[in-house]
Amino acid sequence: MRIARSGGTPPELEIVAREEGVDVNKLRHRVAEGRVIIVRNVKREGVKPLGIGEGLRTKVNVNVGTSTHVVNIDMELEKVRIAKQYGADAIMDLSIGGDLDEIRRLILRESAPLPVGTVPTYQAWMETVAKGKGLPDEDHFIKVVERHLKDGVDFMTIHAAITRELAEKAVKSNRIQPIVSRGGALLAAWMLETGSENPYWKNFDYILELFAEYDATISLGDSLRPGAIHDAHDQLQIAELVNNARLVEKARQAGVMVMVEGPGHVPLDRVVEDVKLMKAVTRGAPYYVLGPLVTDVAPGYDHIGSAIGAALAAAAGADFICYVTPAEHLSLPTPEQVKEGLIAARIAAHAGDIVKLGEKAAAWDRLVAEARARLDWRTMIDNSLDPERAWKIHTQFGTNLPSCTMCGSLCACLVLEKWARKLKGKGVQPSTK
């Protein structure tokens, strides 16, 4: 960010501009203003810089990590491999069980060349409270952040905007669930127990110094995001967003790249206004959307509910989608559920990009559509999001037809084929109506 502000063009900007097909001067201007971030840690080698923000393709993140009840690092590494295979742009390690330092380092190694994010609050808690050592002190929260940066973590969720006042209001509120953010709940409990202010809020200037040293990205957490559509856009959610907007400005002044997380569970008709509100109060900071989940009645299918909201959010200007799996609200996801969640999120991201980026994104759709029109199954399926699944479905009845088995000989493409050939042979183009 500092180099971009001085008029320079670091190689990371050139890489992102080339991959995204955008003018490098426009990209430099957006980075300088904080409307685009380039995610990477100078300590970590072998990672491609990831551009997130205005004018760029909507990116998708995959969460992996152990729980307190299921600690299977081989399974989590398999999830990383699936994420890479099916087109994730970034990975977050949310581990809370096992040797967290070792797990993080293994995930960092396996994830390359994708950037990796973490939530340091979890480890600060697990190293103290979970081991019967009492509450972590203020310094411990900050030391864990520094440890993650030294390991090469590229971006980190920092729950800095939930103040002690907001934590007290949350637990006294009439929300269906006062706080659904795991990190936010841990910090709220710490503040209510100690009577002290949020250590990230209190020490944010020092945190900025740490992130500036490693040129890593802060992802400002939304501890008070609604966990039910009934609670969407209440005073608590908006108050935290205002605090996050203040922190965005502090980060920009320090030359630290920053994005903002949100919004959780939001009714369909408020998704677009949520994105516009966030962009307005942060002056265009990249938006990392969790969901948005547009209904609460879809356990087992929350990846679909999330994809509906995420597509609307992406079209309205959201920049980074955190996938949701079918296991959301129910369980630690399996590798197959990770794949399902990722594919759903990628569909949502691309659907949004067709609106946001126009023909640049829609060229992919045209390629697939033209192949479908000429019954070119190989091209159509090979250019789909999940060719393996598409081929399996296409051949599931074992027939060898030019069409699919749904329409068979009554396929619209086959029915009109002979007339199309005749008209084209006479130099007359067939009507598209």
Image (cartoon, grey):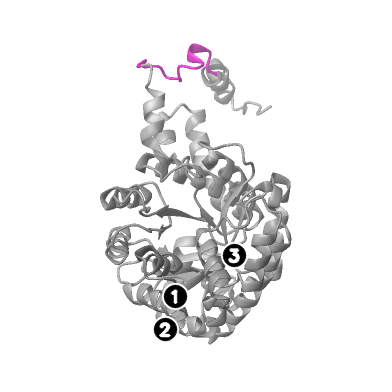
Q: How many marks overall? A: 3
Secondary structure at numbered mark 1? helix
| Residue named by callout 2 | 213
Secondary structure at numbered mark 3? loop
Contact between labelled residues 3 and 1, with CB atoms less than 8 Å apart: no
Left or right of 124 in this view: 172: right
Measured in 3D between alpha carbons, the distance from the residue under mark 2 to the one under mark 1, in whole angstroms, is 18 Å
For this orientation, the residue located farthest to the top is 409
Residue 22 visible in this rendered orientation of the protein: no
Instruction: Tell me which segment is drawn in magenta.
Output: 398-411
The mark that comes first in sequence, 1 or 3, is 3
* Residue 154: x %, y % from top left: 41, 69
Secondary structure at numbered mark 2? helix
| Residue named by callout 3 | 54
Q: Name the mark nearer the viewer: 1 or 3.
A: 1
Measured in 3D between alpha carbons, the distance from the residue under mark 2 to the one under mark 3, in whole angstroms, is 25 Å
Left or right of 182 in this view: 224: right
Q: Nearer the viewer, residue 219 or 125?
A: 125
Residue displayed at 57% across by 37% down: 298
* Residue 360: x %, y % from top left: 55, 53
Q: Name the mark nearer the viewer: 2 or 3.
A: 2
Kind of residue at badge 1: Phe
Residue displayed at 37% across by 15% down: 399
Q: Which mark is residue 141?
A: 1
Residue displayed at 52% across by 82% down: 203
Contact between labelled residues 3 and 2, with CB atoms less than 8 Å apart: no
Image position of 175 with respect to 399: above or below = below
Residue 376 visible in this rendered orientation of the protein: yes
Q: Nearer the viewer, residue 353 or 84?
A: 84
Residue displayed at 69% across by 57% down: 274
